[in-house]
Image (cartoon, rainbow, N blue to C red):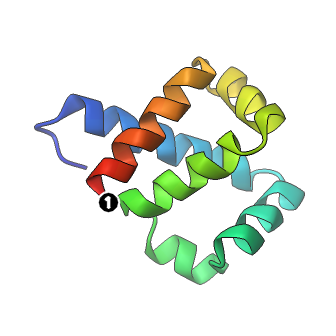
Amino acid sequence: MRSHDTNEEAAETLGLRGLAWTIADEDRAGRLLALTGLDGDALRARLGEPAVLAAVLGFLEAHEPDLIACAEALGVKPEALVRARRTLENDA
């Protein structure tokens, strides 16, 4: 994370938290891996990359029930996850 840009830090943090929420459910984690083409080792190796975190948030955004459930679990609005994805994509 880059400490000089708090918006970017917040986006990375939300991306990581979204990833943790996603992989906590085996079926959802399987869908994420299938749709991104990553395997578990590649995902672990690339955890901090903005493109990977943006892909995770995009995965959630593509299925509104997951986006809403994740936002609720993280205590944020769904729009915050969408903004984080945009920020991460611009940084990738």
State the image quarter where residue 50 is shown.
bottom left
Q: Looking at the picture, how far across and down is residue 16, in whole percent?
A: 50, 47
- So how many labels did they put on this image? 1
On the picture, is 69 further left or further right than 81? right
Instruction: Compare residues 3 and 63 and report the one nearer the observer.
Output: 63
- What residue do we see at 60% from left, 49% from top? 58
Asked whether residue 48 appears in the rendered view, the answer is no
**For this rendering, which residue is in front, 30 or 51?**
51
Q: Nearer the viewer, residue 42 or 35?
A: 35
Q: Residue at x 62, y 78 (%)?
A: 38
Which residue reaches farthest right? 27
Image height of 41 relative to 48, above or below:
below
Q: Position of residue 10 (x, y in %)?
A: 35, 32
Residue on which disc 1 sits: 92
The reply, left or right, for residue 90 in relation to residue 34 is left
| Image side of residue 11 versus residue 64, left or right | left
Q: Which residue corresponds to the image point at 78% horizontal and 42% vertical from the top-left?
A: 63
- Is any atom of residue 66 visible in this view? yes
In this rendered view, identify the residue nearer to me: 37 or 6.
37
Q: Quadrant of residue 74?
A: top right
Residue 86 location (% of width, % of height): 42, 41
* Badge 1: residue crowd in 10 Å (few <14, some 14–19, many ≥20): few
Above or below residue 58? Residue 38 is: below
Q: Residue at x 83, y 33 (%)?
A: 65
Give the quarter of the figure containing the C terminus: bottom left
Where does residue 48 sit, x and y in percent of width and height? 38, 61
- Secondary structure of the residue carrying tag 1 is loop
Name above or below for residue 34 compared with residue 80.
Answer: below
**Three-letter amino acid code at disc 1?**
Ala
